[in-house]
Structure formats: C-alpha cells, structure tokens
C-alpha cells in the first residue's frame, strides 16, 4: 500500500465522462495505490496512519493536529500508477500494482475505515476512471505513506 498524502486547503475530483464531481474543504488528498500482495493489514494500517498524521498546525503554528483534530475531510483517489517502477527503461512497469479485482475492494475498504473507524468524512474519485484532480496544497505539505505486504512497523 502506497499513499501520497497532501495537506489541502481545498481539493476536488472531476470525472467528465460520468458528470461526477466531489470536493472537500480543509483536509487531506490521498492518492492511494494498492500493490500486489496487499491485504486488510496494510489497508487498515494506512487508513489509521493517514487519519492520525499530525500535519496540521496548532495554535503555536506547529504541526501537531491530525485531520481528525481539525474535523477535516479526505478526498481519496485510487492511483495504480503509484506502483509504477521506473528504474528500467523509459516506460513504467506496473507489474507491482494489484489487479483491479483485488485493488477495488481494498480501496473501498480504506475509505470505509477512514469514515467508520476514524471519523473522517471521505469523498472519492471513481475507481478506474480518467479523473481530473484539483488541489490547493497547504504548505505545501506532501508525504509518502507506504507499507509493503507483510512488513512490520519498527
């Protein structure tokens, strides 16, 4: 599981082909890539980590508040390209990305956990759709949150 987490002043996702638009105010934009071998453990860890990351400023301008503390929202967009391997040649290899039939339920589970277990309202992109994501990155603050299948926390 790999997620690019961005602190946002506001953000939106649009899918023109489906006349769909979702937007958030202050909160997180989470671009989520599900990799082959990922399961419930990686997804649960990732949802908890994103919900509890202390990357929002407190009254003393220090990053001590989470999206939960802020009562902010999350815009979660599936992005298999995060699993792309660019080390060899000029065309990325996506062999590490989970196939859609495995990735979609894990993406949905990640969103469900953020909402139900962690109390973070979630807006979503549309799985496997061509999307346009707009973001006002606050800071900017951008983090990579990653847990490989079977990896333990240190």
Image (spheres, helix red, strand yellow):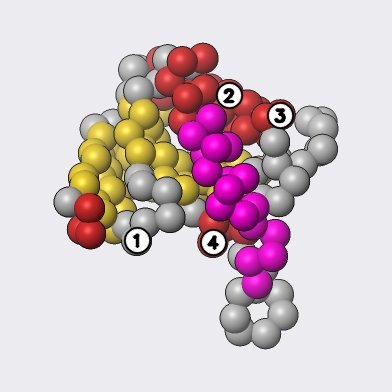
The answer to whether residue 54 is visible is no
Asked if the residues shown at circle 1 and circle 2 are in contact, with their CB atoms under 8 angstroms apart, the answer is no
96 w.r.t. 55: above or below = below
Q: Residues within 10 Å of mark 2 (few under 14, many from 20)?
A: some
- Quote the CA–CA distance across marks 4 and 2: 23 Å
- The residue segment tinted magenta is 93-109
Secondary structure beneath label 4: helix
Disc 2 to disc 3, C-alpha distance:
11 Å
Q: Residue at x 56, y 52 (%)?
A: 100
Q: Which residue is mark 4?
A: 81
SS for dot 1: loop
Residue furthest out toward the bottom: 89
Q: Secondary structure at mark 3?
A: helix
- Quarter of the figure that contains the C terminus: top right
Is tag 3's residue or tag 1's residue first in the polypeptide sequence?
3
Residue 130 is marked as 1
Q: Is residue 98 magenta?
A: yes
**For the residues marked 1 and 2, what is the alpha-carbon distance in whole angstroms?**
27 Å
Crowd rating for badge 4 (residues with CA inside 10 Å; few <14, some 14–19, many 20+) = some
Residue 151 belongs to magenta span: no
Mark positioned earlier in the residue sequence (2 or 3): 3
Q: Which mark is residue 41?
A: 3
Looking at marks 1 and 2 on the same chain, the residue that comes earlier in the sequence is marked by: 2
User: Residue at (70%, 42%) from the top-left corner?
Assistant: 38
Task: Indicate which disc, 4 or 2, sits on the residue closer to the N terminus.
Answer: 2
- The relative height of residue 113 versus residue 102 in the rendered view (above or below) is above
At 23% from the left edge and 39% from the top edge, which residue is drawn?
23
* Residue 48 numbered tag: 2
Q: Nearer the viewer, mark 4 or mark 2?
A: 4
Tell me the SS state at disc 2. helix
Quadrant of the rendered image containing residue 147: top right
Query: Dot 1: within a 10 Å radius of its alpha carbon, few (fewer than 14), some, or many (20 or more) residues?
Result: few
């Amino acid at each position: 599981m790999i997620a690019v987490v961005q602190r946002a002043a506001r953000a939106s996702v649009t899918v023109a082909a489906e006349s769909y638009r979702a937007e958030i105010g202050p909160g997180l934009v989470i671009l989520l890539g599900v990799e082959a071998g990922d399961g419930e453990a990686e997804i649960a860890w990732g949802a908890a980590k994103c919900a509890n990351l202390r990357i929002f400023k407190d009254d003393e301008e220090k990053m001590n508040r989470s999206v939960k503390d802020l009562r902010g929202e999350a815009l979660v967009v599936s992005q298999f390209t995060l699993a792309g391997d660019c080390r060899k040649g000029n065309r990325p290899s996506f062999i590490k990305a989970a196939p859609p039939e495995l990735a979609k339920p894990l993406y949905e589970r990640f969103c469900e956990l953020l909402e139900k277990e962690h109390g973070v309202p979630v807006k979503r992109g549309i799985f496997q759709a061509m999307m346009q994501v707009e973001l006002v990155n606050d800071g900017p603050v951008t983090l990579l949150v990653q847990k490989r299948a079977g990896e333990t926390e240190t």
